[in-house]
Amino acid sequence: MTDMRIGHGYDVHRLVPDRKLILGGVEIPHVMGLLGHSDADVLTHAVMDAVLGALAMGDIGKLFPDNDDRFLDADSIELAREVARRAQEKSWRIGNIDATVIAQAPKLAPFIGEMRTRLADAFGVSVDRVSVKATTEEHLGFTGEKRGIAAHAVCLLFYDA
């Protein structure tokens, strides 16, 4: 029997002026960006937390603390590469990733393919193992009011020892 683990990740950041909007490692043209210590890429953060959760290694705040200046304005895709390296070091491989971005604006459909490609590359899997979806909350809550963006992610890991 193959050993498998499932992980879930969630992240949210506030939208503010004068910041780039980065999702899944892709810069999205928008009038606002996400506030955070790193590049505040909620999609990549949620995926990293899903993988770390499946590994029982905590979350990205433990691995890349926001009070450590080494991670100030960090590229989250590069941080994801480190998470993938740690999984591989423990003989785990990613079976698949399924993620959802929750944002009222901007429209993300034109960028989904590139997000999938960037995440697949960072985690060392083929793009057909990475799903990214986007939805709105029909103008409800902080995401619906365009005050922030959230993301959920799940992943399946297989033990390869």
Image (cartoon, helix red, strand yellow):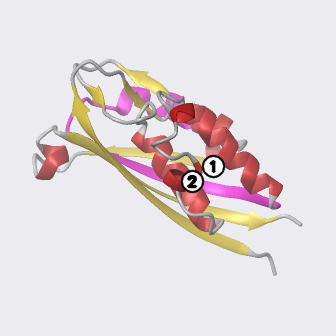
Q: Which residues are magenta?
A: 91-117
Residue 80 numbered tag: none
CA gap, disc 2 to disc 1?
Answer: 6 Å
Q: Secondary structure at mark 1?
A: helix
The image shows residue 3, relative to residue 10, as above or below, that is: below
Q: In this view of the protein, which residue sits in the foreground, 13 or 136?
A: 13
Nearest-to-viewer mark from 2 and 1: 2
Residue 97 numbered tag: 2
Was residue 64 drawn as part of the magenta stretch in this picture? Answer: no
Position of 22 compared to 76: left or right? Answer: left
Position of 129 compared to 112: left or right? Answer: right
Residue 128, position as x, y percentages in the image: 63, 44
Residue 129 numbered tag: 1
Position of 147 compared to 34: left or right? Answer: left
Which residue corresponds to the image point at 68% horizontal and 58% vertical from the top-left? 95
The quadrant of the rendering that contains the N terminus is bottom right
Was residue 100 drawn as part of the magenta stretch in this picture? Answer: yes
Q: Are marks 2 and 1 in contact (CB under 8 Å)?
A: yes
N-terminal of the pair, mark 2 or mark 1, is 2
